[in-house]
Image: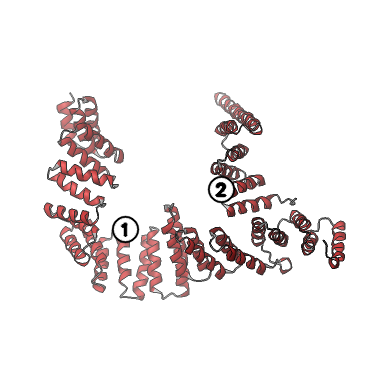
Amino acid sequence: MKRLSLIIVLFYSIVSNAQNAEEIFKSAETKFYAEDYKGAITEYSKALEINPEHDKAYFGRANSKFNLNDIKGSIRDYNKAIELNSKESKYYYSRGNAKYKNEDYFGSIDDFNKALELKPEAIVSDEPDLKNVLDVYNKTIEQNPKDHKAYSIRGALKTEMKDYDGAIKDFSKAIELQPNYAKAYYGRGNVKYIKGDVSGAVIDFNKAIELKPQASADMPDYTKLLDFYNKMVANNPNDAKTLENSGINKVKLNDFQGAIVDYNSLINLNPNDYNAYYNRANIKYTTYDYYGAIDDFLKSLELNPEKTEDSKISIYIKIVEILDKVIEMNPYDSKAFNFRGQYKYNLNEFAVSVIDFNKAIELDKSFSEAYFNRANSFISQNSFDKAINDFSKCIELKSDNYLAYYFRGLTYFKISKFTEALADFNKTIELKSDYVNAYVKRGLAMYKIEKLKEAIDDFSKAIILDSKCSEAYFGRGSIKYDMQDYSSAITDYDTAIKLGENTSDIYYNRGFCKSRLSQHKEALKDYNKAIEIDPSKKEAYFNRGYSKYYLEDKYGACFDWSKSGELGSDEAYKVIKQFCK
């Protein structure tokens, strides 16, 4: 019975919340119609707190923000309303208005098109030789008022007779009766263009293209549409939106070369337009310019200021798909196998990437880049001996490849063969004396074989070459730490952290240096940060315990030592026995 009672209480709570949300929504609507938009926003927000899926509340709040000229805020709320209810035409229409005001003209066109698709509505000197024909269609419509083709033809006749308002009404009626009738959109767009309503014409032409029919009898004259977009571009050659819209619609009309011309112009106008590169890449892929498509996809990714791991993966998958096509056309293309292997590697498909590199090498035994790439795949699978063999083969084929020496050196370093690593880093620097990473890694190798002065020299050289190399400051600071030059070590650690080094080790090391200089309050902050980054770092707990002890926080010190012991520190229990009685 208790469970049933709980269910009943929850049910009435849900019903009550829904009722409260609706009451608050009504209050918001009242304030909206009283033009108290700020008050309305407050009430809509309250309703949304109770019911976050109330699409009408998002729509109302969007309208309120629009009236307060918060256009971007209104667009965000219209987006949410549409996400919750994608079938409401007025949501798209209102968002279209907001986008128009935000100068996103083609975005507004898309929304108006969608609103028209969901709920098409009519928009609110005759030539004597056309009157008889017109009369025929008047009678046809009188006899069959649902004949959408008759309305469309009569619209075309009225266009010829320059009765433009009458033509628009007829085309709109045809659209109302048959929302997917491309000819009616084309005809109405033509009239709008004649009347100077260019943006309205673009909306209708876009829709006509979107609805491109299969039956030739229902096919508008799309060649005229191409002429229209070419004229738009000719009249506005430096308008990015015009070029983009023309390019998009030429693709839909299968005028791929014309679309590429538009995207070329768009890229010349704005070389950082990553969307233009992306769209051009898709066209090149469609027209079998596979390597051109790959170049454009990569450029799009490079320029995208908001690139995420997902966007990278998406591009890499596309490139692999393109290379599948290349290999299908020519299964003896060693470069395509090598290239595909690289992008499978980028997708973390290491074992699969090796198969492609194997094939590239099988087709071309002297393909040094394929050996290099396969070596990196082997490293990712912890097959270090195989990686070393491939780097060695790469060097045999191309003895001036400094990266092959460098990466072989890194591989030796990974398996603690520091002398061999040192030899490869020396060769790397001999071939490329300004390669910062080689000095940093050679410094680490020197440190491992206890050549501390030489290590400091290498880290210092790296800093001279690149004053923003955080790893070099960290490395040099760590050697000074070992040499008990704590003040200098702190200076290097400070710089490394400012440059972005953010590891548990660097904060722990700096904290330890500060402890040795009796700067216990500052040390405590660094130990805290080290533990925040790596809560399993027993040394940080152990030494933080000492800092707390010296700051007379005996309870905190004993707690940290206990935690350090929990994590495996034998020394901690000795300290607890001594200080935590």
- The residue that appears at 26% across and 72% down in the rendered structure is 398
Q: Which residue is mark 1?
A: 380
Q: Is residue 128 left or right of residue 337?
A: right
- Crowding at mark 2 (Cα within 10 Å: few <14, some 14-19, many 20+): some
Above or below, 18 relative to 106? above
Residue 574: percent from the left, percent from the top? 15, 32
Q: Which numbered circle lies on residue 102?
A: 2
- Would residue 209 be found to the left or right of residue 310 on screen? right
* Residue type marked 1: Ser
Give above or below for 407 relative to 474.
Answer: below
Q: Position of residue 513 (x, y in %)?
A: 17, 39
Q: CA distance from mark 1 to mark 2?
A: 48 Å
- Please state if 36 lies on the left or on the right of 184 as rendered: left
Q: Is residue 450 visible?
A: no
Secondary structure of residue under mark 2? loop
Q: Where residue 571 appears, x then y in whole percent? A: 16, 35
Which comes sooner in the sequence, label 1 or label 2? Answer: 2
Under mark 2, the amino acid is Asn
